[in-house]
Amino acid sequence: MSTGTYAPKPGAAPVGRMIAAQTALETRMLLRNGEQLLLTVIIPSLLLVLFSTVDIVDTGADKAVDFLAPGVLALAVLSTAFTGQAIATGFERRYGVLKRLGASPLPRWALMASKTLAVLVTEVLQIALLTAIALGLGWSPHGDPFSVLLLVVLGTAAFSGLGLLMAGTLRAEATLAAANLVFLLLLVGGGVIVPLAKFPDAARSVLELLPISALSDGLRAVLQDGAALPWGDALTLAVWAVLGLGAAARFFRWE
Amino acid sequence: MRGTKNSESVVQVRGLVKRYGSKTAVDGLDLDVRAGTVTAVLGPNGAGKTTTVETCEGYRRPDGGTVRALGLDPIADAAALRPRIGVMLQSGGVYSGARADEMLRHMARLHAHPLDVDALIERLGLGSCGRTTYRRLSGGQQQRLALAMAVVGRPELVFLDEPTAGLDPQARRATWDLVRELRADGVTVVLTTHFMQEAEELADDVAIVDAGRVAAQGSPEQLCRGGAENTLRFTGRAGLDLGSLLKALPDGTAAAEPLPGTYRITGAVDPQLLATVTTWCAQHGVMPDGIAVERHTLEDVFLELTGKELRS
């Protein structure tokens, strides 16, 4: 490189361009990671196919897929917004990625916005795939798409807040273990594939307050029963979102 | 953009104090970096080099004193400062699943007028990384990528935290060449190192840091001249009469036999002194084996200033 190559000419790119670039990179990192794909794509798809075609759990629905598809969509949101984001962000923190980006022209709010957009892009791809599989299994969804959208966005906000709280406060290895464990527990106890009605009343009243239960129950109310927006579930998700994002904003450590 | 004149101090640290719990990492440190120069912050591990540099980068909030980079407060004016500086962390900073060229292109996209990424990849020999992701790159490749990321945005001021740690000699030279090119093009470089050779070869100014303070700052020549004297060493028969030798030597010269048969003369070692010593040896039937004049290095200066070895 010739003389003058490095002559200073500093400047930040326009913030919209930075966010677009960061979102594209974050999305590629999510989709390239094999373990992440196992959680976000393979497990939800397998659960959908397995439990729809084999009569393992009595779902109480005419067609099992009508019960399972909304639950698996909720699980997909959980897997990306919570588990995947917590693990990825935990290791980015551990390996100094967040620190290094902190010295770049990209503002922190723009980094978080990009992470959120990457999660939403991934969710769109997941929902498209899982919807196609469910339709292939004979799913007949009802209801209002805007209610579905609102529930998914609220669920994403709630899970993102909790995921980032974990990633920003625990060691990366602890986040890895805890995020997977929480994924498994919520999969079983959050009304995803096992109806909450199967649990004893006392347990059920607690489990119903979980964000995954609110999301799966809300999506089921709309998509299975064609109900209008389930305000109770939406409110539960909104409360989790405020608590989670608030705590993450307060306690998140960048290094 | 602010104009930067040569006389201007682009980094100004005054009385910096930084504590981590009960441990004081930086204890009243002053540092000035002149525009367009390479300044080496030299010291052993734990001296406070990284803390000082990371305070200038806006990562650490000082517990005392003031820090200005390009005339800006690194924390309060972070949004204005960040596009103008380039940062190479001591390690990491890259997505483990990202390829070298992918990460470098990404950093370029965050800047308004980045360098030509392909040319930079070629210049730093990163083309051979191919499709390998960061976690599988060699340590040297990871270091070069971090260096490339620090310069791709065409910054005015670059902070390199131990840029050649863990590099083989050839890669170290390549990094030094790039630092010299940056300076030639008007970029100000601040680097930390615990290799005195690196500071001597590369730096216009050296700040010797020990226990959180600057023990001395100046050009390598000034530090070597101002501090210690030079040394003449030789070996011979044990138990020579040093009193007789000293009589032949100018005032202010010292002679010692630290180990039997090993002699050390310290003082203003010049050709005349060397001739006097060899003449005295000839008169006393001594063959001064392994006779050597040692110019004082930064390592000696460091030892003299701090009483510690630079590298343990």
Image: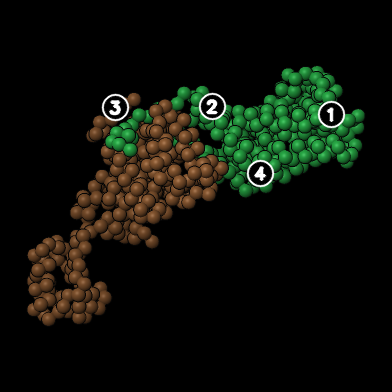
Chain colours: A green, B brown
Whether marks 3 and 4 lie on the same chain = no
Image x and y of residue B31, in percent: 31, 42
Q: Residues within 10 Å of mark 4 (few under 14, many from 20)?
A: few
Same-chain status of marks 4 and 2 = yes
Query: What separation in Å lies between label 1 and label 4 (alpha carbons)?
Result: 29 Å
Side of A205 relative to A235 (left or right): right
Give the labeled residue for mark 3. Answer: B3
**Mark 2 or 1: the one toward you:** 1
Same-chain check, marks 2 and 3: no
**Label 2 lies in what chain?**
A
Q: Nearer the viewer, residue B144 or B301?
A: B144
- Label 3 marks a residue whose chain is B
Residue A20, disc: 2
Mark 1 → mark 3, Cα distance in angstroms: 69 Å
Q: Residues within 10 Å of mark 1 (few under 14, many from 20)?
A: some
3 or 4: mark nearer the eye: 4
Q: Secondary structure at mark 2?
A: helix
Estimate the spatial distance between the alpha carbons at disc 4 and disc 2, rounded to whole Å.
Answer: 25 Å
Sequence-wise first label, 4 or 2 = 2
Please report contact status of discs 4 and 2: CB closer than 8 Å, yes or no: no
Q: Which residue is mark 1?
A: A138
Chain for numbered disc 4: A
- Graded by Cα atoms within 10 Å as few (under 14), some (14 to 19) or many (20 or more), the crowding at tag 3 reads few
Residue sitting at x 58%, y 38%: A29
Looking at the image, which residue is at 53% across and 31% down?
A22
Marks 2 and 1 close (CB-CB < 8 Å): no
Amino acid type at circle 3 is Gly
What amino acid is at disc 2?
Answer: Ala
Image quadrant holding the N terminus of chain B, namely top left
Q: Which mark is residue A35?
A: 4
Front-lying residue, B228 or A185: A185
